[in-house]
Image (cartoon, rainbow, N blue to C red):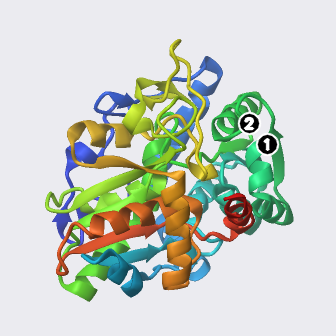
Amino acid sequence: MSDHDSVLGQPARSDLMHADDRGCFGAYGGRHLPPQLEDAIAEVAEQYALAAADPAFLREYDDLLAQYVGRPSPLFFARSLTRHAGGAKIYLKREDLNHTGSHKINHCLGEGLLAKRMGKTRLLAETGAGQHGVALATAAALLGLECEIHMGAIDVAKQRPNVVRMEMLGATVVAVDEGGRSLKEAVDSAFAAYARDYRDTFFAIGSVVGPDPYPTIVRDFQAVVGREARAQILAQEGTLPDALVACVGGGSNALGLFTAFLGDDEVAMYGVEPGGRGAAVGEHAATMTHGRPGMLHGMTTYVLQDDSGQPAPVHSIASGLDYPGVGPQHSYLKDSGRVSYVSVDDRDCLDAFALSCRAEGIIPALESAHAVAYTVQLAGRYGPDAVVIANLSGRGDKDIDYVHEVSSRG
């Protein structure tokens, strides 16, 4: 499972797919850790390599995806969005229809199974929008594990429905009140908690970020999204798509969709970052657009930095995207030119949220609305025979009160 050298007969580009022996994608990635965590993370790497080659582990995981998550998720032809864009056919990969309402359950179940295999009794993680926290709390409940979720205090307030869900599922939610009180601080806090108690704990990172092997682990569990989308679009249209679109914070849903198509040079790929309120420092979280290489949370990657080289404050209307870094494989894909990274601002995101609701009867997560916004723009540049797939990574139940409040303020 960790290789995916061939997806439905199409060879993947190994140079874009795989970390090297240092855990790096080109110049990005690696394993930069305090000494007390080196053995713990090395154990995760060793055990994941064994699990990924174990047919019984893979069978149990695949069975849960089918019987518990409800996979495969549909690939939906969005007729009204297509008419609105006036160009390419728009398809939506409906990860919002998964159990728990987003793509996050794909890797949370995998990480939970790996934790049990390793004899761990507790799952520990960070969350921004709360979707990773809900999915991990769900996996913990299913597998009989304890669960602790660290979440920025701002996001606790914005995403109250997800906080309630986590608590109902038995998780302990730790509100982080330091610094910017958002996703970056939640990651810092979770890492600190892991350093204090790693013997019985599995740190279930919520995206394709962090020290090796986490960017590979999370990507591999998310790659089911692209494998399904590839088979579905070939069945429905008889051809590969002209373009793929997904939002990017840490970047797990994007790599989930992109991975199966990396060897298809004719398929364009777009990662959509949060342009926020503007280009000034602290007004956005568009790491690829405004960042530069640096170190963050145990990896080398593109980072939004202040003048002293520290992670800069960030903003996005979508809590799951307000992160000053990005997964290291995305950084390599940017430098290689294989994926283009663009941004959508808060206003266009809100407009796309409303458009999706009224045109298709689908309430998207604000994170996913960034992808919808760019997809509508992009589709208009193509003719009617072209096909664009957007990853609808999550549903918007968690966002409706916040969107209503923001819309009421004008």
Residue 393, visible in the rendered structure:
no
Q: Quadrant of residue 88?
A: bottom left
The image shows a total of numbered marks equal to 2
- In what quadrant of the picture does the C terminus appear? bottom right
In primary-sequence order, the first of circles 2 and 1 is: 1
Q: Are marks 2 and 1 in contact (CB under 8 Å)?
A: yes
- Where is mark 2, residue-wise? 181
Counting from the top left corner in percent of width and height, residue 7 is at 25, 67
The disc labelled 2 sits on which kind of residue?
Answer: Arg
Relative to 69, does residue 32 appear above or below in the rendering? above
Residue 249 relative to residue 82: left or right: right
- Where is mark 1, residue-wise? 153
The disc labelled 1 sits on which kind of residue?
Answer: Ala
As drawn, which residue projects farthest toward the front? 410
Residue 180 relative to residue 90: left or right: right
Counting from the top left corner in percent of width and height, residue 404 is at 71, 66
Query: For the point 69% across and 49% down, which residue is it?
Result: 119
Tell me the CA gap for discs 2 and 1.
5 Å
Query: For the point 24% across and 76% down, which residue is it?
Result: 87
Counting from the top left corner in percent of width and height, residue 154 is at 76, 44
